[in-house]
């Protein structure tokens, strides 16, 4: 039993995801003495934090036990670290990833991997050609509610899947009366903004695995709030969509519906709710909970619900219990990727999967521009 160390560069460490997810979860693994590998060794991540602002990045490093840091990405890439995580703002990600590939680093990055499917596939091909391990963060199916939904589907409870519906979003303040809760780059095309680019990255893998692979898309997008106030109190024009609705065709004939906006007020179980209807049963999940209704438990809701006093539809569903321990979804992504690098364990969300996610956004934008249905071709390395 040996202790092995593996260097991880976190580029964008001072950002929301960088600090609260990637740094925090890797530090948690290290704090427990490392990730136990199958041969009994322990793999201890050693972090090198990278950020553009020396003061902020050095303060973050100091606050977490004196971690190594630099404000120079080239310097970080010239070092001996094995893995490069890019969780800086989305804009310019391909250039940063290309530099990391050239430096021979294994690549594990946030979504979306690139602004277009061509660039996303170019990254996947470049990393593969160099024999590097590569992956994208796909955390949502590790959230307890959606993990249960996947379990329900895989158990065969739903029968033939007829439809999957994603209802997602919440109200993002415009910065005038209250500060916006999303960074302003989310609303600027040049900085990698746009709700479809951001969120299709999740819907693609969720729908592919929870229901069936997506084969065609027809989308409608809008900019509900065209002017906002940024982190410094400056007004700016929003030049991307903050609302994206899409109809999908799925392999095998099922229908997908995505309704997603940062301009809606939440009156449902959670900010993300996914319902799947099948011939043998239905299931609905939020981030933390999942409920099912079997065909044999399905009430007659149309006339039954219309009677005085009606029916409480919410009470007609049965909750899927907690049977597995809840582990932070980003930690699960990291544990799998670390095993992929250290002991060649399989890793499903490679950069090809990352490109598939970008592809759905790409084709949704094309559907809007050309006002038509667009087929989703298969992507291969
Ligand atoms: N997997 C998920 O569920 C999830 C959730 C939120 C965000 N994200 C992704 O994570 C990334 C970061 O999002 P966030 O919400 O943490 O944003 P954020 O704005 O909080 O953090 C981004 C960080 O990147 C830095 N930065 C900006 N431009 C940079 C550049 N050119 N080079 C280096 N650093 C730069 C910023 O200073 C900031 O520290 C995005 O790509 C986003 O799509 C993923």
Image (cartoon, rainbow, N blue to C red):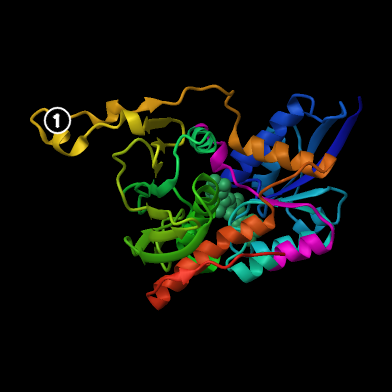
Q: Is residue 105 above or below residue 323?
A: below
What residue is shown at x 50% (from left), y 50% (from top)? 207
- Quadrant in the rendering for residue 226: bottom left
Q: Is residue 291 part of the magenta span, yes or no?
A: no
- Quadrant in the rendering for residue 351: bottom right
121 and 69: which is toward the camera: 121
Q: Is residue 185 left or right of residue 72?
A: left
What residue is shown at x 14% (from left), y 37% (from top)? 303
Q: Position of residue 379 (x, y in %)?
A: 64, 65
Which residue lies under the disc numbered 1?
Answer: 310
30 and 134: which is toward the camera: 134
- Looking at the image, the residue that sits furthest to the left is 308
Asked if one can make out residue 237 in the rendered structure from this viewpoint, the answer is: no
Q: Is residue 87 left or right of residue 254?
A: right
Q: Is residue 137 part of the magenta span, yes or no?
A: yes
Q: Position of residue 339 (x, y in %)?
A: 78, 39
- Looking at the image, the residue that sits furthest to the right is 2
**Magenta-highlighted residues:** 122-144
Q: Position of residue 326 (x, y in %)?
A: 57, 26
């Amino acid at each position: 039993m040996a202790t092995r160390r593996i260097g991880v560069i976190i580029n964008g460490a001072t950002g929301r995801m960088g600090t609260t997810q990637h740094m925090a979860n890797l530090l948690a693994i290290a704090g427990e003495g490392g990730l136990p590998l199958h041969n009994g060794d322990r793999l201890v991540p050693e972090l090198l934090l990278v950020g553009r602002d020396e003061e902020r990045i050095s303060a973050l490093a100091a606050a977490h036990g004196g971690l190594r840091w630099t404000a120079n990405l080239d310097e970080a890439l010239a070092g001996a670290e094995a893995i490069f995580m890019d969780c800086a703002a989305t804009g310019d990600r391909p250039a940063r990833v290309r530099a990391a590939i050239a430096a021979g680093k294994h690549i594990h990055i946030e979504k979306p991997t690139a602004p277009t499917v061509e660039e996303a596939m170019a990254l996947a091909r470049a990393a593969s050609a160099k024999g590097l391990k590569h992956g994208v963060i796909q955390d949502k199916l590790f959230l307890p509610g959606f993990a249960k939904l996947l379990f329900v589907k895989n158990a065969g409870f739903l029968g033939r899947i007829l439809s999957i519906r994603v209802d997602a979003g919440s109200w993002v303040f415009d910065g005038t009366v209250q500060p916006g809760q999303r960074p302003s780059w989310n609303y600027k095309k040049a900085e990698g903004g746009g709700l479809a680019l951001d969120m299709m990255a999740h819907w693609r893998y969720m729908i592919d695995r929870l229901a069936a692979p997506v084969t065609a898309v027809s989308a409608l997008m809008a900019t509900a709030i065209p002017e906002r106030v940024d982190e410094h109190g400056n007004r700016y024009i929003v030049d991307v969509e903050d609302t994206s609705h899409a109809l999908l065709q799925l392999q095998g004939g099922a229908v997908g519906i995505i309704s997603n906006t940062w301009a809606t007020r939440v009156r449902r179980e959670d900010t993300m709710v996914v319902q799947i209807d099948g011939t043998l049963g239905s299931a609905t999940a939020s981030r933390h909970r999942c409920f099912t209704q079997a065909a044999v438990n399905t009430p007659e809701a149309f006339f039954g619900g219309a009677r005085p006093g009606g029916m409480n539809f919410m009470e007609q569903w049965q909750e899927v219990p907690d049977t597995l321990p809840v582990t932070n979804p980003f930690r699960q992504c990291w544990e799998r990727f670390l095993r992929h690098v250290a002991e060649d364990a399989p890793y499903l969300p490679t950069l090809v999967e990352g490109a598939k996610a970008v592809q759905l956004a790409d084709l949704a934008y094309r559907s809007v521009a050309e006002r038509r249905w667009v087929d989703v071709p298969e992507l291969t390395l």
